[in-house]
Image (spheres, rainbow, N blue to C red):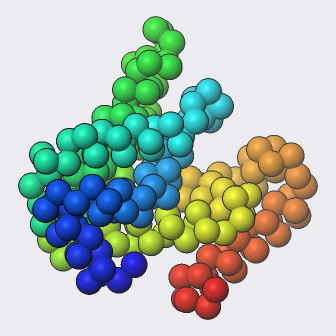
Amino acid sequence: MRNSEYQRLLNESLQGNQEAIGQLLDRHRPYLKFITQRALDGRLQARVDDSDIVQQTCLSALRNFQQFDGKEEAQFVAWLQKIHERNIQDTIRRHAGAEKRAVGNEVAGSRLEGLFHLETLSPSQRVMQAEDAVRLAEVLASIPADQGEAVRLRHIEGWSLADLEQHFGRSETAVASLIKRGLENLRKRLNGDA
């Protein structure tokens, strides 16, 4: 989505156009899902559907849109991230066992700190970072799911090939091939070839 089209949607949303708000939120779903996948550890991912957390964030944002007081994409992304961060933390608290609660929140909190740091950047850096992160999440969501997951786990989460081999139930060669195909698809889409 071009910046002018995004700005038009944001302006219409600020004027109360519910359809425009819905389109803005839909545009950010892949990014929110990406953040959720990064924030939740493996045990919690097995019990929680990340789409449920994304849906909760979108509903909260829709209900509370009148509280958004920004005018730019980076401000909207930062506002949406704060809502999403709260929903992720609430989910972790609900699903963590009593003795694991503090450890789970600490681990997820440290992951979230790295994801939600737009306030420390200059306005132009915030816009660029928000646009890049949203674009990456959109493109990752557009390639085949197993390729997107393999690329995310290897290059964003830092998983080893052995961990990926176990996770996917495939040989190391098959996993490496999956990552290679995913990166090729990612490059094509980021360069506008697909």
- Tag count: 0
Quadrant hosting residue 105:
top left
x, y percent for residue 15: 13, 62
Residue drawn at the location 70% of the way across and 71% of the way down: 182
Nearer to me, 44 or 192: 192
Q: Is residue 15 above or below residue 82?
A: below
Q: Is residue 61 above or below residue 23?
A: above
Quadrant hosting residue 122:
bottom left
Nearer to me, 163 or 148: 148
The quarter of the picture where the C terminus appears is bottom right
x, y percent for residue 145: 70, 59
x, y percent for residue 51: 53, 42
Nearer to me, 21 or 101: 21
Nearer to me, 165 or 126: 126
Q: Tell me, yes or no, if residue 28 can be seen here.
A: no
**Left or right: 6, with 48 as reference point:** left
The quarter of the picture where the N terminus appears is bottom left
Residue drawn at the location 20% of the way across and 48% of the way down: 65
Residue drawn at the location 44% of the way across and 72% of the way down: 135
**Left or right: 181, with 140 as reference point:** right
**Left or right: 51, with 193 as reference point:** left
Q: Tell me, yes or no, if residue 191 can be seen here.
A: yes
Q: Residue furthest left?
A: 69
Q: Residue furthest top?
A: 98
x, y percent for residue 114: 35, 51
Residue drawn at the location 50% of the way across and 37% of the way down: 52
